Amino acid sequence: MSELVTGEAVALELRPAKLPSRALAVLLDLAVALIAYLVVTTGVVIATASLDEAAQTALSIAMFVLLLVGGPIAVETLSHGRSLGKLACGLRVVRDDGGPIRFRHALVRGLIGVIEILMTLGVVAVIASLVSARGRRLGDVFAGTLVVRERIPVTRTGFVPPPPPWLAGRFAGLDLSAVPDGLWLAIRQYLTRMQQLDPQVGWSMAERLATDLAGRTGAPAPHDVPPAAYLAAVLQERQAREARRAFGNGAAVAAPPPPAPAAYGGGVAAPAGVPYVPPAGVPYGPPAGVPYGPPGGTGHSPVAPDVVRQPAPPVPQDEPPATGFAPPA
């Protein structure tokens, strides 16, 4: 990975092309140019058979310069750094600041390429690429260019697990308008990587993020909810609001999938009257030796408030059921 700085002081991370891929692209370009040179030269020789030997030699030299030197320069200029070989290998020539090349860059690369590639059979270009930190040959150094990889393997995005089911809809009344995008990004990155962190480090990071989020929303974080679960629930509430805003208030928002067993203790809600105790070692539970609970040192486990159901009031039996019929006076 190479970090380039643009004229606007923006850092760009580009992947310089490796020597094998660059050599393969050059060989493909040379093969195409050589085939075109042989075809065009043969046609010109046949068409100018009546000319003398000096004129035919001059035409051959002109065809060589035009096709093997001017051809690559024209192709790189018109395609902004993508020749046929580079296009096949997923490469591109860019300026040092990450912008597209122009005619002067392609001209310098092409003229110096005649010396370091054609006349020396690529030996000078290979040595210069091995010595350079970013794999640049002499033509790139003098032209101020760099060959980078355009096709980068796509990495799988981190999965953001949903919050426990007993937190669904609990934070629907929070004001999230003051939360900056940077904090949302930090919360999302933490939730996608919390299973890879050390329990102590992950717990402290969740507490800091939960404190920052509570300060932005104006409502304190609940003491009966673990910090990671609080972050996941608020993030899901924000996503639900964005979905309703995008698809309309009446649009039905799909219910989140059940929580992952490794992150949320199996995804089973606590029965009525039973406190919710996160299993040891999961990101939602506190690390070993760290008491969790409201201030005061009680250290009790959080209780799932939405799971406890109140019994329905009994229906009195001495009153007749309502039938809608009134007896006559």
Image (cartoon, grey):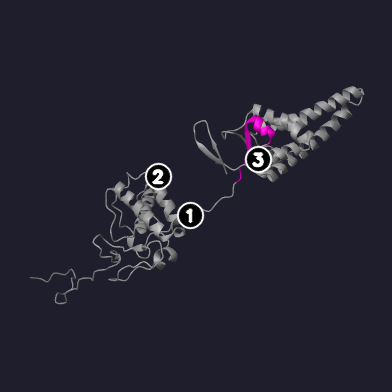
- Asked whether, in this view, residue 25 is left or right of residue 39, the answer is left
Q: Position of residue 204 (x, y in %)?
A: 37, 56
Residue at which label 3 appears: 135
Indicate which disc, 2 or 1, sits on the residue closer to the N terminus: 1
Judge whether 58 appears above or below 31 on screen. above
Query: Mark 1: which secondary structure?
Result: loop
- For the point 74% across and 36% down, which residue is it? 124
Residue 205 seen in render: yes
How far across and down, in percent of the image, does residue 56 sit? 88, 25
**Residue 182: numbered disc:** 2
Outermost residue on the left side: it is 329
Give the residue number, with chain letter if any, for mark 1.
Answer: 158
**Quarter assignment of residue 206:** bottom left
* Nearest to the observer: residue 312 or residue 185: 185
Q: Secondary structure at mark 3?
A: loop
Check the picture and name the quadrant holding the N terminus.
top right
**Disc 3 residue type?**
Gly
Instruction: Please state, as top left, top right, bottom left or bottom right, where the C terminus lies in the image.
Output: bottom left
Number of numbered markers: 3
The span from disc 2 to disc 1 (Cα, nearest Å) is: 17 Å
Q: Nearer the viewer, residue 75 or 240?
A: 75
Circles 2 and 3, Cβ within 8 Å, touching? The answer is no
For the point 86% across and 32% down, the residue is 42
- Residue 256 image offset from top left, x and y in percent: 41, 59
Q: Is residue 144 magenta?
A: yes
Range of the magenta residues? 137-151
